[in-house]
Image (cartoon, helix red, strand yellow):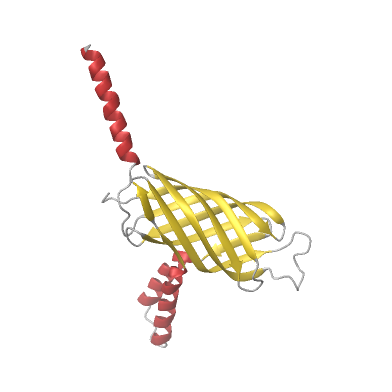
Amino acid sequence: MKNIVIVLLLIVGSSTINAQNNKITKHSLGQSILSISPTVLLNTPNGVQLAGGIKFQLFLGKRLSIDADLVFSKDYFHLGPGIIGVPIGLWGLSFDDEYAPIQSFLFSVAAIALSFEHLSYHLPVNDDLDISPYVSMLRYKSSYEHKNPSDPDFIGEQLSFASGVQINKYYGKFVFSPYCEYNLGYKDLDSRFNMGIYLGIYFIGKNQ
């Protein structure tokens, strides 16, 4: 009987530890998520296409993150500048240009501001689940028809607007994130839809 009690205590203890490991604390500055994704592009110039994607999110606090994403397929890719502007801007601020200090400063400020073009807001549901609507104002997109990629009348490259929602389920340091989004080109004004599932690693930090 004593052995059975010990075994039961070990099972309960193990379950409690696993449950605690699957819980997330509040997001904080400097935490990040790196993810890859199979993606379905629902209505490109070539119809429905399968694609691959990668996304990096950097948290600015417990609710807000800036994101950078890349999705690619045959004759298609889009890129959200996201946090790319942060290192460029910091490098510019640290670079002493004696001939054009004002221009260097303005370039750095513009580069850092660019990083805020893709923002996510994380709404907690419980300890290991949040929902993050997001918006991207300056996504670069290149999309061509397979049969005629050189047609001068076809709008293939343009900046676009994107908005969507992502559901983040946390399993310790792993993240499972289905998403769907709406995309609108600034030149052709065509509406597009994408959906996929991000599989990522959550870099919590040493203080968690």
Q: Residue furthest right?
A: 147
Name the residue at 35% across, 55% down.
31
Q: Residue furthest top?
A: 1
Q: Position of residue 118 (x, y in %)?
A: 47, 65
Q: Position of residue 11 (x, y in %)?
A: 30, 25
Front residue of 124/207: it is 124
Image check: 182 left or right of 83?
right
Q: Position of residue 172 (x, y in %)?
A: 36, 42
Front residue of 102/197: it is 197
Name the residue at 33% across, 58% down.
30
Tell me how many marks there are.
0
Image check: 148 left or right of 98?
right
Vertical comparison of 174 with 134: above or below:
above
Image check: 167 left or right of 77?
left
Name the residue at 71% across, 61% down.
45
| Among the 4 quarters of the image, the one containing residue 18 | top left
| Among the 4 quarters of the image, the one containing residue 174 | top left
Front residue of 14/135: it is 135
Vertical comparison of 175 with 66: above or below:
above
Q: Residue furthest left?
A: 2
Q: Position of residue 28 (x, y in %)?
A: 31, 57
Image check: 16 left or right of 137?
left
Name the residue at 39% across, 59% down.
58
Quarter the N terminus occupies: top left
